[in-house]
C-alpha cells in the first residue's frame, strides 16, 4: 500500500494527503490545489505538491511561475516542495504501471516530512489517478455548477430531476474508500466543491443544488462552495501568485480590488470548510520541537519555507 511508504511528518505522523480529483477537465483542480497549498504554507505548515497530469502540467507550471516571479522580483514567497510524475510508456501495461507506482512512491516518500501533500490529478480515468484516490485522506472534487459536470457523479431522470444511479467517478471513489479502509482502516473524507457559481441564483442552480444534496446523503460526501468565475484567478496564474498572497504583490498601489477581496474570502472559507487537521498538526509539531530542544538543550528553528 502506498500510504505505508510515507516518511513521518514532524511530530511522528504521516503527512495528510489532499487529492484534488475529478475525471472531467476544466473543473478548477489545479487552481484549487495551488491555493490550498499556499494557504497552508502561509498558515505555517510545511507543504509538498505532486502533479499527476503529465499532459497539461498546470500545477507544475503554476509552481514554476511562482518561483520565477519570486526570483525576478527579489521577493520572498512560500513555495511548496514540488514533484511531477510522468505517465510511463511501455509495451506491457503492467510494466508501465509499475514504473508509475515507483515514481509516485518516490515523490511521496521525499515529501514524507511535510505536514500536508496536495496532489493534482488529470481529468481522466488513469492508473495514476486511481492510485492517488486510494492514498487520499481528504478528497476535494471541484465541479462547475451545471448538470454537465454533475453527470460525472450521477445520472438523473430528466423528467423528475431525481438521481437515478451513481456514475463512473462516484463508483471509483467508493472503491478507493473501500481499498483505503481495508489497507489501514482510515476513512477518506470526500468534499464536493461547487465552482463557478453565478452571483444570481437561477432555476438550474436550484436543481443542481437539490440533486447534489440528495446524492451527498447517498454517497457520503460533504458540500462546500468554491471559487466563482473571477478575473483575479485568471490573472494570478501567470504570476504564480494566489488570492491568499499579500495584495501588494499583485496590486500596483497595494490596494486590493473587490474581485481580489472576494477571491481571498472564497479561499479562506473553503479551507475552513475542508476541516483539515491543522490544529492537531500544530500541536504535534510543537511537541516535537519541545522534545528535541530538551534533548539538545538549545532552541531550534523550523526549516525555512521561504525561497528567494
Image (spheres, helix red, strand yellow):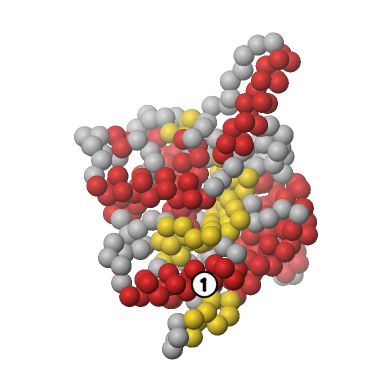
Q: Position of residue 209 (x, y in %)?
A: 43, 69
Q: Is residue 244 visible to us here?
A: yes
The residue shown at (37%, 72%) is 206
Q: Position of residue 23 (x, y in %)?
A: 54, 68
Question: Farthest residue toward the top?
Answer: 297
Question: Farthest residue toward the left?
Answer: 253
Position of the N terminus by quadrant: bottom right
Query: In the displayed structure, would residue 224 be above or below residue 213?
Result: above
Query: In the displayed structure, would residue 12 be above or below residue 220?
Result: above
- The answer to whether residue 39 is left or right of residue 8 is left
The residue shown at (51%, 32%) is 44
Position of the C terminus by quadrant: top left
The residue shown at (46%, 57%) is 224
- Say which residue label 1 marks: 214
**Quarter-of-image position of residue 226:** bottom left
Q: Which of 56 and 303 is in front in this view?
A: 303
**Quarter-of-image position of residue 65:** top left
Q: Where is residue 45 in the image (x, y as percent from the top left)?
A: 55, 35
Q: Position of residue 131 (x, y in %)?
A: 67, 60
Q: Is residue 98 visible to us here?
A: no
Query: In the displayed structure, would residue 77 be above or below residue 159?
Result: above
Q: Which of 267 and 30 is in front in this view?
A: 267
Task: Give the crowd class for mark 1: few <14, some 14-19, many >=20 residues within 10 Å.
Answer: few
The residue shown at (52%, 72%) is 214
Query: In the displayed structure, would residue 301 be above or below residue 49?
Result: above
Amino acid at each position: 500500500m502506498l500510504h505505508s511508504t510515507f516518511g513521518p511528518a514532524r511530530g511522528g505522523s504521516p503527512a495528510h494527503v489532499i487529492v484534488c480529483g475529478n475525471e472531467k477537465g476544466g473543473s478548477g483542480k489545479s487552481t484549487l490545489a495551488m491555493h490550498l497549498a499556499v494557504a497552508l504554507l502561509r498558515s505555517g505548515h510545511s507543504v509538498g505538491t505532486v502533479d499527476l497530469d503529465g499532459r497539461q502540467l498546470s500545477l507544475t507550471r503554476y509552481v514554476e511561475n511562482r518561483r520565477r516571479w519570486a526570483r525576478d522580483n527579489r521577493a520572498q514567497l512560500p513555495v511548496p516542495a514540488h514533484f511531477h510524475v510522468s505517465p510511463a510508456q511501455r509495451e506491457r501495461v503492467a510494466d508501465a504501471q509499475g514504473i508509475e507506482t515507483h515514481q509516485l512512491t518516490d515523490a511521496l516518500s521525499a515529501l514524507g516530512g511535510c505536514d500536508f501533500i496536495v496532489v493534482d490529478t488529470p481529468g481522466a480515468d488513469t492508473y495514476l489517478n486511481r492510485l492517488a484516490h486510494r492514498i487520499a485522506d481528504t478528497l476535494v472534487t471541484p465541479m462547475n455548477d451545471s448538470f454537465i459536470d454533475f453527470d460525472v457523479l450521477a445520472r438523473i431522470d430528466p423528467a423528475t430531476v431525481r438521481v437515478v444511479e451513481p456514475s463512473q467517478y462516484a463508483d471509483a471513489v467508493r472503491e478507493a474508500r473501500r481499498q483505503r479502509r481495508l489497507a489501514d482502516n482510515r476513512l477518506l473524507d470526500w468534499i464536493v466543491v461547487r465552482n463557478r457559481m453565478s452571483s444570481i441564483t437561477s432555476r438550474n442552480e436550484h436543481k443542481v443544488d437539490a440533486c447534489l444534496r440528495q446524492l451527498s446523503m447517498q454517497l457520503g460526501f460533504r458540500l462546500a462552495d468554491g471559487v466563482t468565475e473571477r478575473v483575479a484567478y485568471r490573472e494570478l496564474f501567470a504570476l504564480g501568485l494566489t488570492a491568499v498572497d499579500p495584495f501588494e504583490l499583485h496590486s500596483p498601489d497595494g490596494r486590493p480590488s473587490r474581485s481580489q477581496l472576494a477571491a481571498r474570502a472564497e479561499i479562506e472559507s473553503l479551507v475552513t470548510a475542508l476541516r483539515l487537521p491543522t490544529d492537531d498538526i500544530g500541536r504535534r509539531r510543537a511537541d516535537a520541537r519541545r522534545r528535541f530542544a530538551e534533548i539538545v538543550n538549545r532552541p531550534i528553528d523550523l526549516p525555512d519555507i521561504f525561497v528567494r
